[in-house]
Amino acid sequence: MNTLSKTFRTVAILLIAILFTSTKLLAGGNKNNENTLSYNLGKASVDIKYISMQDPNTSDQLTLRNIQAAHFEFSKNMNVNDVHIGRGEYEVSLIEFEGGLGFNFHALDVRKEDVQVALDEKKGQYNEWLNYTLQVVEDDKIAGEFNWKENTYTFSMEVSISNKVFSYLEREEQENTSEWIDYYQAAIYAYKNDIDLDHSFTWAKKALEADQNEHTLELNMLYLEALGRDDEAQQLSALIQ
């Protein structure tokens, strides 16, 4: 389901590592301490902890290997360049793969898999400093940009609509008023957006248990195919009229 090339090579631990001596610093956030920035987006928050680089980025030292670790914490589900990132804490790395650069979100929750996000690239001018800007551009969106050698890379982080979809289902379950359509809507949204399919498959199964119809059968078949369970998917397909 992931559209990024699987040939990417992780070459460094990330991203938002900035020299305080740089002429451009992270913008638009509230500094909580020496190396933490917080952004409020509507009902969500984004916290970024970064470490300043130990070596200057001179032309012969500007490599991915001298970037230090960064830590992201999302209070709600987010979309980063239209890729779903679930709420939680992540170690974010800059990765190189065939055709460009991207971010690797490594969840501190071991139950979650890594998620890769492609960066938008455009030609720029070489700069010996690694400069970043991050700004809140809408109530629920952050725009980011950084230069890497002769290129400029851009990305966005915005609050995902999945928060409303999933929170509605959670509320219905707590109140014991959930129906098959509630599970179906959450599961189909998760499927179409490739969101934690192992977990969201549970909703598809609950929808099928509550009401076996052509929609719930087809959805479960799609999940089984996506999860590599083709034999089970074939059994369900025989039940669809």
Image (cartoon, helix red, strand yellow):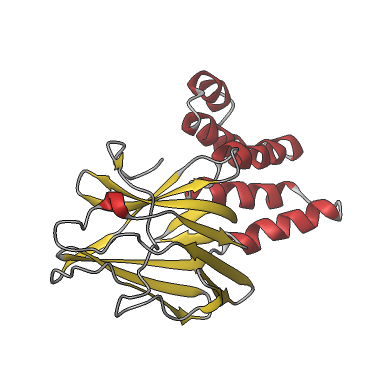
Residue at screen point 32% across, 79% down? 24
Residue toward you, 65 or 41: 65
Residue at screen point 51% across, 63% down? 49
Rendered image quadrant of residue 77 = bottom right
Find residue 156 and report its horizontal and vertical position in percent.
40, 68
Question: Is 7 situated left or right of 73 in this image?
Answer: left
Residue at screen point 84% across, 53% down? 174
Q: Quadrant of the N terminus?
A: top left
Residue toward you, 29 or 226: 29
Find residue 75 and report its horizontal and vertical position in percent.
62, 63
Whether residue 76 is situated above or below residue 144 in the rendered picture = above
Residue at the top extreme of this rendering: 231
Question: Is 241 situated left or right of 114 in this image?
Answer: right
Find residue 69 and report its horizontal and vertical position in percent.
43, 54
Whether residue 137 is situated above or below residue 234 in the rendered picture = below
Whether residue 229 is situated above or below residue 157 in the rendered picture = above
Residue 41 visible here = yes
Residue at screen point 56% across, 31% down? 240
Residue toward you, 86 or 104: 104
Find residue 173 and report its horizontal and vertical position in percent.
80, 51
Residue 86 visible here = no
Whether residue 239 is situated above or below residue 103 in the rendered picture = above
